[in-house]
Amino acid sequence: MRARRIIGIALVLWLAALGRDRFDAWIDATILPPLAVEMSVEVLDRDGDLLRAYTVADGRWRLALPPDKVDPKYLRMLLAYEDKRFYRHGGVDLRSMTRAVLQAVKNGRIVSGGSTLTMQVARLLEEGTTGQVGGKLRQMRVALALERRLSKDQILQLYLHLAPFGGNLEGVRAASISYFGKEPARLTPAEAALLVAIPQSPETRRPDRAADRAEAARNRVLARAVAEGVLDADDASAALREKVPGLRKAFPAFAPHLADRAREEAPQALSHRLTLDLEVQKKLEALAQEAVEGRGERLQVAILVADHASGEILASVGSAGYQADLRQGFVDMTRALRSPGSTLKPLVYALAFDEGLGHPETMIDDRPMSFGAYAPQNFDRLYLGTIRMREALQLSRNIPVVALTDALGPARLISAMEKAGMKPVFPGDQPGLAIALGGVGVTLTDMVQLYAMLARGGVARPLRWRLDAEGSKGQRVVSAVAAWQVGDILAGLAPPPGAPGNRLAYKTGTSYGHRDAWAIGFDGRHVVGVWMGRADGTPVPGAFGADVAAPVLFQAFNRLKGKLDPQPAAPASTLLVANADLPLPLQRFRSRTAAFQAEPDAPAVAFPPDGAEVELLPAGLKVRVTGGTAPFTWLADGVPVVVGMDARETMLALPGEGFVTLSVIDARGRSARTSVRVR
C-alpha cells in the first residue's frame, strides 16, 4: 500500500514535471512581435532640452522615456492601480485573475481586470484586442515570453513608450508634453493620476474632448492611490481641485531649419544634440516675429548668435516663421547667398592696417575717384574731402574703402575671406574692386563667422552647431592689433535711436537696390548677425541697415543677456597716438598711383568747364579757380593775361572769338588747364 502511494506520488510529480517542461517549451517557442519600437527623432539643445521632435512613420508622437526620467509618483500610482504585484509575478498574475473572475461572478459584470502591465505591453506590441478569449490567451503567452527575455525595467519602458493617450499620442512623455506642456520628470499628483487613467480608455477619456470623463477617471486613480498608501489624503484633496487640461499643446518646434538640417545630415540618428540654448532661441524667435510685424507680408528676417570664444552657435533663426507664406518662411536665410553691402568694410580696414597702409588716425581722401573704368560713388552722392580712416569706416564712405582695396588688391581680400572660413561666390567668378562694396555673394553665417574672427583678436574658428563636433584651433587672418583697432572703431558708432548707449562694436550695411539690410555686432563674448530683406531677392524700398536691422541687433543683445561684456583692452603693441604723432608714412594714405595723381589741394579750373562753349562779355571772360595757393597767374594759349591775382574769380580780356586754352598757375607752381570755345 505504501509502495503504491509512493509510486502514485512519483507519477504525479513526473507528469507535473513533464507538463512544466512542455509548458516551458511552448512559452520558449513563442514568436514575439518586434521589440524595437520606432521612436520619434528628437533634436535637443546644449542642456538636453527638447528643441523639436518629429512624428514616427505613421504620424504618431512616440518619444523615448527611460523609467528614471519620469516622476516616481506616477510610477507608484501606475503600479498601485494597474499591477501591484508587477515585480513579483512572471507576466501573468493568477491571484489577480482569480480575484477578477470572482468579482465578475459576484457582481454580474466586470469590476476589475486581471491584466498585468506585461500583458498590456503584449497587447500594445501586437495592437491586439482584450475582449476575445483567444486574444487574452495570446497576450498571456506573449507576456510570459516577454518576462523570460526582458527585464522588468525593459518591460516597464515599453509601456511608457506605447501606452495610448488618445489621437496620435503614444507614450507617457508625448502625453505629458501635449497635455501639460512639460516633461514628465516632475508631475503634480493630479497630472500623474490623469496619465494613469487615460490609457484604460484613451479615446473616451481624452482631456481635450471629454474633460468630464477624464476628470472622473483621474479621481478614481487618486482614490486608489490614497487607499494603497501611495498618496496622503491632503495631497489627494488638493489634486481633486486641479483642473483637467482642456486643450492639447503644440509640440516644441524651435530652430526648425537647423533641426531639419541635423536630421538630413544624419538620417539614422534618433537624437541630435545641438549647441543651441533653448531659452535664447525662444527669445530671438519671438524677436524675429516682432521685427517683421506690420512691415508688409514679404519682409523677412534672420538672426544668428554665436559665442565667438568657442565658435558655438547659441541661436539660429532662419526666418520669422516656419511656414509657406509670402515671406517664404521655409527658406533658411542664415544660409542664403546675399550681397553684404558695407559689412565687409571692417575686413578691408583690418588688412590695410596690417599691411602698413594706414592707421585709424591716418588721413584719407573721400572725393570722386576713378580706378580704371570703375568709378564708385558714395551712397549719399556726397564727399567729405580728407578725413581720418576711423571716420571713413564709421561713416561707411565708399571711396576710401575702394582705394584701400585697390592698394591691397582684390585677391588679398578674397584670400582673407576664405581664411576666415567664408565661402564667397562672385558674379562670373571675376572679382574686382566692387567686392569691397558688396559685389560678392555671402551668407549670414559667413558674416557672423567673419565678425567672430575680429572679436577673437584676428583668429578664425569655424562656427559649429553640433555639440559633439570637435572645435578647431583656428588660424590667424589679421593681427591682434588690427582686429582690436577695427573693433575700437566700430564700438565708437552711435547706437540707433532708442537703443541703450553702450560700446557694442557693430556695422550696418545695405546692398544695391535695397535688397538686403544688415547689422552685425560683437561684445567681449558674443557675436550677433541680423539680415533683413525679401527671401526672393526683390528690393525693399527705403530699407537701410541702420534703420531696419540695427535696432533688431541691439534688441537681440538686450534679450541675450541684458548687458554687454566689455571689449578687451588694446594689445601692448598698439600705437595709440593722434595723427600728428604718427610716423610720416602713416599720416596720410597714398595709393600705388599717387605719384601720377594731382595733389588733393592742387588748383583746378572750376569755370569755364573743359569743352564748354562760353560767351565773351564786354568785360571779358569770367574764370574761377578752386584749390591751389594764391596768388594766381592766368594764361590764354600760353600768354599771361592776369599775373599775381589773389582773388579766385576774375575777368580775362581776350582778343576775340574762337578756341582757346586757359591755364592757371598757383604760387607753388602747380597748374590746371581747360579748353573752351569763345563766341
Image: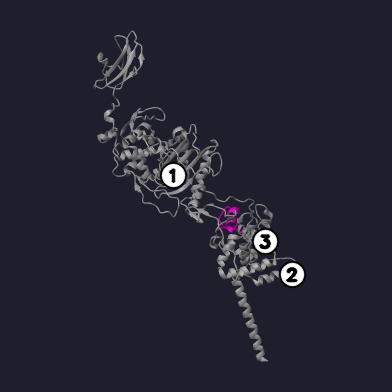
Task: Give the residues drawn in magenta, as a range.
Answer: 170-189
Q: Which quadrant holds residue 152?
A: bottom right
**Residue 633 position (above or below residue 441):** above
Residue 231 visible, this orientation = no
- Under tag 1, what secondary structure? helix
Q: Which of marks 1 and 3 is nearer the N terminus?
A: 3
State the residue position of label 1: 445
Q: Which of marks 1 and 2 is nearer the N terminus?
A: 2
Q: Which quadrant holds residue 130?
A: bottom right
- Under tag 2, what secondary structure? helix
Q: Give amino acid for label 1.
A: Thr
Q: Which of 121 and 388 is in front in this view?
A: 121
**Residue 308 position (above or below residue 624):** below
Q: Position of residue 507 (x, y in %)?
A: 41, 38
State the residue position of label 3: 220
Q: Which of marks 3 and 2 is nearer the N terminus?
A: 2
Q: Residue 571 carries which label?
A: none
Number of the front mark, 3 or 2: 2
Residue drawn at x 54%, y 44% as measured from the top left: 322
Q: Distance between the residues labelled 1 and 3?
A: 55 Å
- Under tag 3, what secondary structure? helix
Residue 145 visible, this orientation = yes
Q: Where is residue 195 in the image (x, y as percent from the top left)?
A: 62, 58
State the residue position of label 2: 105
Dot 3 alpha-carbon crowd within 10 angstroms: few under 14, some 14 to 19, many 20 or more = some
Q: Give amino acid for label 2.
A: Val
The C terminus - image quarter:
top left
Q: Distance between the residues labelled 3 and 2?
A: 23 Å
